[in-house]
Amino acid sequence: ALAACAIEWAIVKDVDRVVIFSHDTDLSPAVEVIARIKGPHAVETASWRGNEYRKRIPPIEGVRNHLLSEKVFLALEDVTHYGRTARARIAGRSKPQTP
């Protein structure tokens, strides 16, 4: 859900830059799509390394990656459930309009 929202905001909402904070390498395709469509300046990644997390989104040419300590990353953590938010937004659009 985060990947879909990042792409939506980059393209539909036309934001200047999307920053994906994650160590999840499954988000690489979203970073690649945004970089390809909007340019590498339009997306950045931030990840952390700790005892449990050693991976990060692989480097993508021209895309900046910020390597944070786990403590800093957790202080910045966004706990939004993007899947729930997106489903609610879609459900709101799909309801019939009442006069």
Image (cartoon, rainbow, N blue to C red):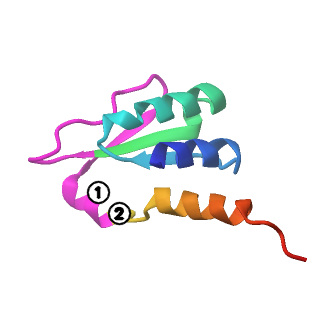
In the image: residue 26, left or right of residue 15: left
Observer-nearest of 84 and 14 = 84
In the image: residue 81, left or right of residue 71: right
Q: Is residue 7 magenta?
A: no
The residue singled out by tag 1 in the image is: 73
Residue pictured at 58% horizontal, 41% vertical? 7
Q: Does the magenta stretch include residue 59?
A: yes
Pick the quarter of the image with the C terminus: bottom right
Find out whether the residues at labels 2 and 1 contact each other: C-beta distance under 8 Å. Answer: yes
SS for dot 2: helix
Q: What stretch is highlighted in magenta?
A: 48-75
x, y percent for residue 22? 34, 46
Residue pictured at 28% horizontal, 36% vertical? 56
In the image: residue 32, left or right of residue 22: right
Q: Quadrant of residue 72?
A: bottom left
x, y percent for residue 50? 14, 48
The residue singled out by tag 2 in the image is: 76
The amino acid sitting under disc 1 is Phe
The circle drawn on residue 21 is: none
In the image: residue 30, left or right of residue 45: right
x, y percent for residue 70? 21, 54
Observer-nearest of 69 and 56 = 56
Question: Please, which residue is most extreme toward the top here?
Answer: 61
Residue pictured at 21% horizontal, 52% vertical? 69
Q: In which quarter of the image is residue 40?
A: top right
Q: Quadrant of residue 98?
A: bottom right
| As drawn, 70 above or below 66 | below
Residue pictured at 68% horizontal, 41% vertical? 11
| As drawn, 85 above or below 63 | below
Observer-nearest of 55 and 65 = 55
